[in-house]
Image (tube, rainbow, N blue to C red):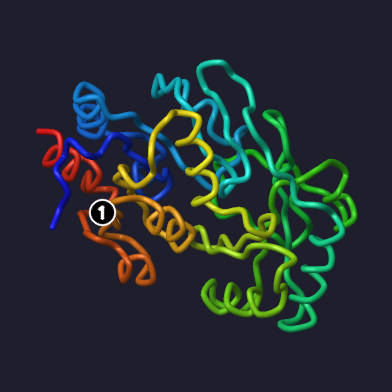
Amino acid sequence: MLTSPAAYSLVATDLDGTLLRPDDTVSPRSRAALARAASAGARHLIVTGRPVPGIRALLDGLGYEGLVVCGQGAQVYDAGAARMVASAPLDREPAETALGKIEAEVGQVFAAVDQDGPDGLTLVEPGYRMPHPSLPARRIRHRGELWSAPVIKVLIRHPHLSDDELAAAARGAVGDLASVTMAGPGTVELAPHGVDKGTGISRAAALLGLDPAEAVAFGDMPNDLPMFRLCGHGVAMGNAHAELRAEADEITLTNEEDGVAVVLERLYG
């Protein structure tokens, strides 16, 4: 049974495949539903796998000035003040060791990294294909260049394995060297061990003086599972991965059908 809408003091939304439509825009209906939730006293918190540089223009377009959990929980960014509040880099040694263990298990993978910091770059080694071609990335010549600056996560792809197969093999190979998650099609990622969207939303909620148990959370991929497990009510999109749908409290329509708005209109109507 749903909790009373008044209990949801926080609305946590993933971006890709959730709040965003395929063209990286937020529909007028979703904007209106978020405004309705805000007028009822709820705070909106964006929780995304994208690093800070990959969302700043989007936040400006939305007029969003709150906190943002970025990089699978590795970063907390204050959009209004344009400053990084917290960051958890992935050390080079465990990252390289983790890649080596994965390749020993499944053969060659292709890698990219998101650098730390509000102006960090996404570096892509030869053979790696970006899952979101619209996101900025810099091509490098060899893997060693990936570590030219501190990173928050490593993205990996395999030429033959599915995302689910690669994620499962990576989890088995890396142990406590890193946290492994699947964030979207073609997006298997290694984050600092113990860092995920759950730890990120916990930190952001504490800064806001709110309890994640009083949050309604929206997502579409397995990387949203830690957020669902922490928040009071987890809503999977109609286009969500089966693993997330299995643990959701509710399944709404797809991101193309304003699934987030449908639920918010009911809760805050």
The quadrant in which residue 131 appears is: bottom right
> Where's residue 240, x and y in %?
34, 62
Single out the residue that lies furthest toward the bottom: 105
Taking depth in this image into account, of 214 and 71 the one nearest to the observer is: 214
What residue is shown at x 27% (from left), y 34% (from top)?
Answer: 27
Q: Is residue 143 above or below residue 81?
A: below
Q: Which residue is mark 1?
A: 254
Q: Is residue 141 above or below residue 120?
A: below
> Where's residue 235, x and y in %?
27, 54
Q: Is residue 115 left or right of residue 239?
A: right
Taking depth in this image into account, of 221 and 21 the one nearest to the observer is: 221
Q: Which quadrant does the N terminus fall into? A: bottom left
> Where's residue 267, x and y in %?
15, 40
Question: How many labels were placed on the picture?
Answer: 1
What residue is shown at x 74% (from left), y 75% (from top)?
Answer: 102
Q: Is residue 128 left or right of residue 14?
A: right
What residue is shown at x 68% (from left), y 59% (from top)?
Answer: 193
Circle 1 crowding by C-alpha within 10 Å: few under 14, some 14–19, many from 20: some
> Where's residue 168, x and y in %?
58, 78
Q: Is residue 129 left or right of residue 63?
A: right
Q: Which quadrant does the C terminus fall into? A: top left
Q: Is residue 251 left or right of residue 130?
A: left
| Secondary structure at numbered mark 1 | loop
What residue is shown at x 63% (from left), y 80% (from top)?
Answer: 169
